[in-house]
Amino acid sequence: MRRYGKNPDEDDIRVRPNRKGNRPRTNIRPKHEDAADGMVLTVDRGRLTCLVEDRVVMAMKARELGRKAAVVGDQVAIVGDLSGKKDTLARIVRIEKRSSVLRRTADDDDPYERVVVANADQLAIVTALADPEPRPRLIDRCLVAAYDAGLEPLLILTKSDLAPADKLLEAYGALGVPYAVTSREELASGDAALRVRELLDGHVTAFVGHSGVGKTTLVNALVPKDRRRSTGHVNAVTGRGRHTTTSALALPLTDAEGWVIDTPGVRSFGLHHVDPSRVINAFPDLEPGTEGCPRACSHDEQDCALDAWVADGHADPARLYSLRRLLATRERREGD
């Protein structure tokens, strides 16, 4: 058997070919400085629909991004065929830094975070006043998620022709959350869309709510030229809506600046990812009062300094009640 020395440079030495290619491995990634800017409109089974200038382009994620996934609302860099023609496919090579991320988990015990949307600055929580009945615990959880993500919350109450809105609005009045109340007749006439559009103008707004509350119907009224075809109904036995929206979709507002992002209906909104200590940031009138709190104060215990702060007239007691109610939602299930 022939043995080679330290410098085997003879011509008859055979080199085993690399089955994965002969290019040397490198950690240097291409910069793609000529990539075009785009926005992810929807994601469906690995294919991403993006807006590049005024064209809708189909794209897929580049392998070099690894496990990093693009979601609806992401600003991305795209290379390849950007014509938007049928059967063409571009490639997303970079996901730009996000200004905000709305997350949720399946439940409070699930450590796996699901990114709902990226780069939104407003969260519209849509709930029906009847058929199905409102679920205040789900509203509270969405509010906590919005505050944690740095999004401004907005409450939209639908089907006011079936039940009054006074009781629900009173429960959230201390939070100062903007709201709109709509009826089915107003949606049909377009009056509801005009009022809601004023609250959405200039914002990127994600819509969340459980199935059957009229979320997609409202989106259809806001963007009639790009309306989502399917709308659902409420099961008369269970009182729950049926899922009609299966993927998030970003749509430009009609007759206004901004975007609306319709998301699939949710039946739970887990808050495993939320640090309760950050919820206080949404209460600037109460935050100074926490300086006298004991270390790691939950703000719902006997030695909490907020009680004295409120008693001295620095803030409305209803605000402290609202804070503690939101903090407690992380320990409760939506159906409780």
Image: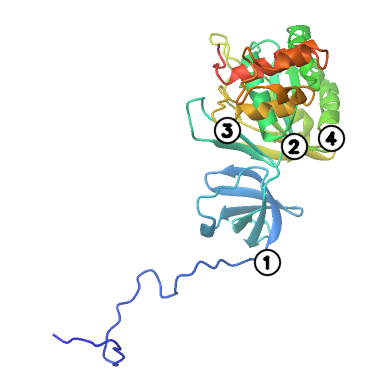
Residue 100 spot, x, y in % from top left: 69, 40
Of marks 2 and 4, the one in the foreground: 2
Please, what is the three-letter code of the amino acid marked with disc 4?
A: Asp
Quadrant (top left, top right, bottom left, bottom right) of the C terminus: top right
Please, what is the three-letter code of the amino acid marked with disc 2?
A: Asp
**Which residue in the structure is indicated by mark 3?**
246
- Badge 2: residue crowd in 10 Å (few <14, some 14–19, many ≥20): many
Residue 260 spot, x, y in % from top left: 74, 35
The answer to which image quadrant residue 151 occupies is: top right
**Which residue in the structure is indicated by mark 1?**
33
Please, what is the three-letter code of the amino acid marked with disc 3?
A: Thr
Question: Extreme left residue here?
Answer: 1
The answer to which image quadrant residue 327 occupies is: top right
Residue 323 spot, x, y in % from top left: 69, 18
In the foreground, 270 or 263? 270
Of marks 1 and 3, the one in the foreground: 1
**Which residue in the structure is indicated by mark 2?**
121
Report the residue at 82% width, 37% height from top: 254
